[in-house]
Amino acid sequence: MDLLELARGPLFTGALLFFIGGMSYRLVTVIGMGWRRNRVPSKKNPSVGAGVSLLKGWLIFPFWPRVRGTFARNPVIYIAGFLFHLGLFLIVLFGAAHMLVWKDLLGFGWPTIPLPFIDGLTVAVILALIALAFNRLAHPVVRKLTRPGDWLNLLFVALPFITAFMLAHGIGPRYERMFAVHVLTVDWLLVWIPLSRISHFVFYFFSRTNYGAQYARRGATS
Amino acid sequence: MPARETIYESWTRQGITRRGFLKLSAVLTASLGLEYSGVTKVQAALQSNALLPVIWLEFQDCAGCSESLTRSHNPTLVDLVLNSLTIDYHETLMTAAGFQAEASKTQAMQDYAGEYILVVEGAIPDGTNGYCTIGGKAAKDILTDAAKNAAAVIAVGNCATFGGLPKANPNPTDAGGVWDFIDKNKVVNIPGCPPIPETMTNTIAYYALFHKLPELDDKRRPMAFYQHTIHERCLRRAFYAEGKFAASFDDEGYRNGWCLYKLGCKGPITYNACAGLKWNQGVSFPVESGHPCLGCSEPNFWDGGGFYEGLSSPLDEPTLVAVLGAAAAGAAIGAGMVAANRAQKKKAQQAEGKGEA
């Protein structure tokens, strides 16, 4: 069994199962944290607050009047964060090679985006991650909040994109080896996600709706 | 020991003129992938080198590689291999059979010790499990005996090189390739299922002329033929870059001749000369004629995922039971943690309560 077979075979399966198990563990521990019952009458409808907060989470757009402040406060985080997330989703879902992974796992496929666009998005994602890394150093508040795990998050998320770019452009070792390295970085990311704050892609929605509901109870329109 | 005539003498005996000889040596130089300046070296070698004796062994094979060899479209090289080179033992091509054939092989091995080329076709079962014996002798022993005094060993086809179909899971005969059984440094691998005829003939011709192995890659394949992937030279490559793929064997993309990546093409990781040399007198090659590359010149190609499954797709996707099991295990551990935390909290509160009292 060569490196590529190992990465595509048992390591991927193991990483995926660890990811599923790990996320399930974290979800249960968050839900079971033990919320205290709030007996104070709500000033506004908590469900509406949760909904509005969730919608705002989705509708992040620089000139959307309600969130303009977010952009003005730190344009780097805003633009780089936006580019990174957009690129990530488009690449993972609509890259031809990635769609084939989903097709294999789910049993159905969908149309994909041409390679040059995916390539451009990959570059955008890498640049965005570099900008976010600089922002961590430059912004005094973010710097204070940064822990070693955050640097590892940036690194482990960047590696699949960097290796993918090298793979697509024939930089480094021969295709099959670079391909194996790329898959290995993804396998590792699957293991790392439940152990890190990258798991926010699930918990983000819980925390947003929770905060929205809490604000509504206190009468604030979120 | 039989008289050894040179390749040139053999050709002139067959009626090839001096002009014909010059032409043929130019063709030969080009087909070996040498520079034009190599012509004089090739001519000198043809005139001085004796005919190269070849012993061709077949083990767990389908004779497809021999079939491929006989379809070599370059007549010069077929002549070179089948006539000018003396094939002293080839189970499919020789007329002798039984003890007579074995005697012929033993004789050739004695007469040309240290000089003959051993070509092996088919996988070799390990040990004495009774699979694949000839005249009561195990394939492994036949191979090691013949390889001992061979000048070079050329493994042809995926079975002889990497174990091929016989080695595929569950490998009932414990089969392997030639290099699993003898000194690797003596072996040249010409994988493929079958290999392109010219890759076999040209490699043998190279040895006949220069008495050394051609430049090899890390899998001991001649660089002249296995330097580039199918994908690198593919005529559908532009469609790959454009993102134009056939998604099934009957859709518009397929009819338009678009890239076969989504149909499971293994071209990007398969090193072979199909897209350059092509098959059947340069007519076409699998991807050109509409079928994704199977990756037949790479190790474990039978077990490397389904032929029609994407190159990037996982090799063994987890079952629903495994997924649900993992989720349930995670949830159970999580629930355990929650219960433990709550118990601890309760205990702490009770202790606090007692303290206040």
Image (cartoon, coloured by chain):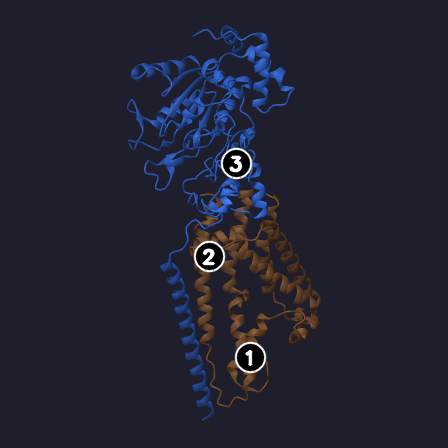
- The chain to which mark 3 is attached is B
User: Could you say where residue A33 lies in the image, as x and y percent from the top left?
Assistant: 47, 77
Residue type indicated by callout 3? Tyr
- The chain to which mark 2 is attached is A
> Please, what secondary structure does the residue beneath circle 1 have?
helix
Q: Which residue is drawn at 53% across and 72% down?
A: A205
Q: Is residue A183 visible?
A: no
- Which residue is tagged 3? B271
Q: Which mark is residue A212?
A: 1
Q: Residue at x 57, y 58 (%)?
A: A90
Q: Residues within 10 Å of mark 1 (few under 14, many from 20)?
A: many
CA gap, disc 2 and disc 1: 34 Å
Q: Is residue A109 visible?
A: yes
Residue type indicated by callout 2? Ala
Quadrant housing residue A149: bottom right
Whether residues under marks 3 and 1 lie with C-beta atoms below 8 angstroms apart, the answer is: no
- Which residue is tagged 2? A15
User: Could you say where residue B90 lies in the image, as x and y percent from the top left?
Assistant: 38, 19
Q: Residues within 10 Å of mark 3 (few under 14, many from 20)?
A: many
**Is residue A49 positioned above or below B79 on the image?**
below
Q: Which chain is brown?
A: A
B225 sits to left or right of B98: right
Q: The blue chain is which one?
A: B
Quadrant housing residue A78: bottom right
Residue type indicated by callout 1? Gly
**Is residue B249 positioned above or below B214 on the image?**
below
